[in-house]
Image: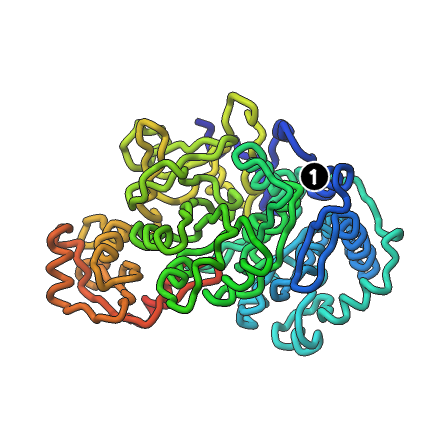
């Protein structure tokens, strides 16, 4: 395996320099050309639906050109970072494609973030133009952002005034920076993972063979479109497949079901909390989800009992996925024919392979746990075509650590069985070191979730002067509050004594970010 010294990183941008990979065997070479195929073959097919608004592929292409012309009139050019902080709406994916045609760099900022969080993303990325809801002057003052700020209404006025024929068409480098996805920031300050147009195309392309598209396919997610992974897995993936993308606005059970039924949605992506809520909401009519043919769940572990209950209630199986912002998106998925259990996550998609390594970077045999790493496959149709992130923006040291040896190091711990099925056991950084013994939070969480009164759980370490760390847990109950002694007895039947949490808190809900990941830092702060 290559050494750190053999990874060439630009000290200014923090991004890796590498030889271009092989082109994908199918599809366009760039996101800028994403609509070329659909325009040629079915320009009048519905491409985008946003409530009462809809666009054919021909109309969508013209709208993208108009958005590109408007952005250019606002000073956006090659390499400029353009930040979008809007709720789910058609303007976000249209603006995304417009930035790609300008060879600019797209950045999503969740509108729900606090002003200091927005300020960090804007300033760290050195954003040139920020498009946000509300008053632009107020937004600029609240975040102490000195760059150009345009409100949503001002941006829409610029688009209305623009002539699509004026849109610039610079030469597109498929391997240059195209978008930034900031890490969730569950520990420390979020870092910006930079992606190229090339490596944002594969999530949609890979499904062309695994799930061939049908003209009736309609795809969307209620998750925030300002999260790059969600934008790619939703509307952009639909366009890559030549099918209809649908803008969903509501993630609550009744609102989501109503939008699925109204739009006859066939494919969606959810997080575990949404799956749980759909199972336990008695006001939901299972018939509303009858059109769905594919449901992917990611962002966090999903208990098997929740997935079984969902399948029983809605007569469709939600498949688990495993991925990360640096990949980007999901790179391992369950198959429909494997059992629903908590023991494994799934199999790597066709264009990459999972490698398990030890602390010395030696590859481990099957059934031995180590760090989960990713690399492109070396044989077959997709050989040598996959690339992960270009690295972390302005953080060369972090890029070297992430991509050392020209493989993507996830920081997660897992193992492969002899059939190539991956089991993820937790984050290396999340391991609790209690008195010299390692405790895997995931192992303890699985036992907690097996208790009939526990519907959600997270395990984390809290500082201890004597032991270094103690094991703590927070749980959400299904109504009946479990007896503490009985719960500890349940844990003791399955775990060594040192793994049983010293502290168990019962909460109404776990603090989660927009990707569904538990904010352990908040729980530790409360514990302190």
Label 1 residue SS: loop
Quarter location, residue 348: top left
Percent coordinates x, y for residue 521 in the rendering: 37, 64
Q: Nearer the viewer, residue 510 or 483?
A: 483
Percent coordinates x, y for residue 15 in the rendering: 59, 43
Residue 124 in sight:
no
Residue 238 in sight:
yes
**34 versus 303 height, above or below:** above
The structure residue drawn at horizontal position 69% and vertical position 35%, both measured from the top left corner, is 29
Q: Residue furthest top?
A: 379
**Quadrant showing the C terminus:** bottom left
Image side of residue 322 versus residue 462, left or right: right
Image side of residue 184 versus residue 433, left or right: right
Q: Nearer the viewer, residue 499 or 163?
A: 163
Percent coordinates x, y for residue 426 in the rendering: 33, 48
The structure residue drawn at horizontal position 46% and vertical position 45%, both measured from the top left corner, is 323
- Density class for disc 1 (Cα within 10 Å; few <14, some 14-19, many ≥20) is some
Percent coordinates x, y for residue 16 in the rendering: 58, 39
**400 versus 279 height, above or below:** above
Give the labeled residue for mark 1.
30
The structure residue drawn at horizontal position 58% and vertical position 68%, both measured from the top left corner, is 111
**Quadrant showing the N terminus:** top left
Q: How many numbered dots are placed on residues in this image?
A: 1
Q: Which residue lies furthest to the front in this view?
A: 287
């Amino acid at each position: 395996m290559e050494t750190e010294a053999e990874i060439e990183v630009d000290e200014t941008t923090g991004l890796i320099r590498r030889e271009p990979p092989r082109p994908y065997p199918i599809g366009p070479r760039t996101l800028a050309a994403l609509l070329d195929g659909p325009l040629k073959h079915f320009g009048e097919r519905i491409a985008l639906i946003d409530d009462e608004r809809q666009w054919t592929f021909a109309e969508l292409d013209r709208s993208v050109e108009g958005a590109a012309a408007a952005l250019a009139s606002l000073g956006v050019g090659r390499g400029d970072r353009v930040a979008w902080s809007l709720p789910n709406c058609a303007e976000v994916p249209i603006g995304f494609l417009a930035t790609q045609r300008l060879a600019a760099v797209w950045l999503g900022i969740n509108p729900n973030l606090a002003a200091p969080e927005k300020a960090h993303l804007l300033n760290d990325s050195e954003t040139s133009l920020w498009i946000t809801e509300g008053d632009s002057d107020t937004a600029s003052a609240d975040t102490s952002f000195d760059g150009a700020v345009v409100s949503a209404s001002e941006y829409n006025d610029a688009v209305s005034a623009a002539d699509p024929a004026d849109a610039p068409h610079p030469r597109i480098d498929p391997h240059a920076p195209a978008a930034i996805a900031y890490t969730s920031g569950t520990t420390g300050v979020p870092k910006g993972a930079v992606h190229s147009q090339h490596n944002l195309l594969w999530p949609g392309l890979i499904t062309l063979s695994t799930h061939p598209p049908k003209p009736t396919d309609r795809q969307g997610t209620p998750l925030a479109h300002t999260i790059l992974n969600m934008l790619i897995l939703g509307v952009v993936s639909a366009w890559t497949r030549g099918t209809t993308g649908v803008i969903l606005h509501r993630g609550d059970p009744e609102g989501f079901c109503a939008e699925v039924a109204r739009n006859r949605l066939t494919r969606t992506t959810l997080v575990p909390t949404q799956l749980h809520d759909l199972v336990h909401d008695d006001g939901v009519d299972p018939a509303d989800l009858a059109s769905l043919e594919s449901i992917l769940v990611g962002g966090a572990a999903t208990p098997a009992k929740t997935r079984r209950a969902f399948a029983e209630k809605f007569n469709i199986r939600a498949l688990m996925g495993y991925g990360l912002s640096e990949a980007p998106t999901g790179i391992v998925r369950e198959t429909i024919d494997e059992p629903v259990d908590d023991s494994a996550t799934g199999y790597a998609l066709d264009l990459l392979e999972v490698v398990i390594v030890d602390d010395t970077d030696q590859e481990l045999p099957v059934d031995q746990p180590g760090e989960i790493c990713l690399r492109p496959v070396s044989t077959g149709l997709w050989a040598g075509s996959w690339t992960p992130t270009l690295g972390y923006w302005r953080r060369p040291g972090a890029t070297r650590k992430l991509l050392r040896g020209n493989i993507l190091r996830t920081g997660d711990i897992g193992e492969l069985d002899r059939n190539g099925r991956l089991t993820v056991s937790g984050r290396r950084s999340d391991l609790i070191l209690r008195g010299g013994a390692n405790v895997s939070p995931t192992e303890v969480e699985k036992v907690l979730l097996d208790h009939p009164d526990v519907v959600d759980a997270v395990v984390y370490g809290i500082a201890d002067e004597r032991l270094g760390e103690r094991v703590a847990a927070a749980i959400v109950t299904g109504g009946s509050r479990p007896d503490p002694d009985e719960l500890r007895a349940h844990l003791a039947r399955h775990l060594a004594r040192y793994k049983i949490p010293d502290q168990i808190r019962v909460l109404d809900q776990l603090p989660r970010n927009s990707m569904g990941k538990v904010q352990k830092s908040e729980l530790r702060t409360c514990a302190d």
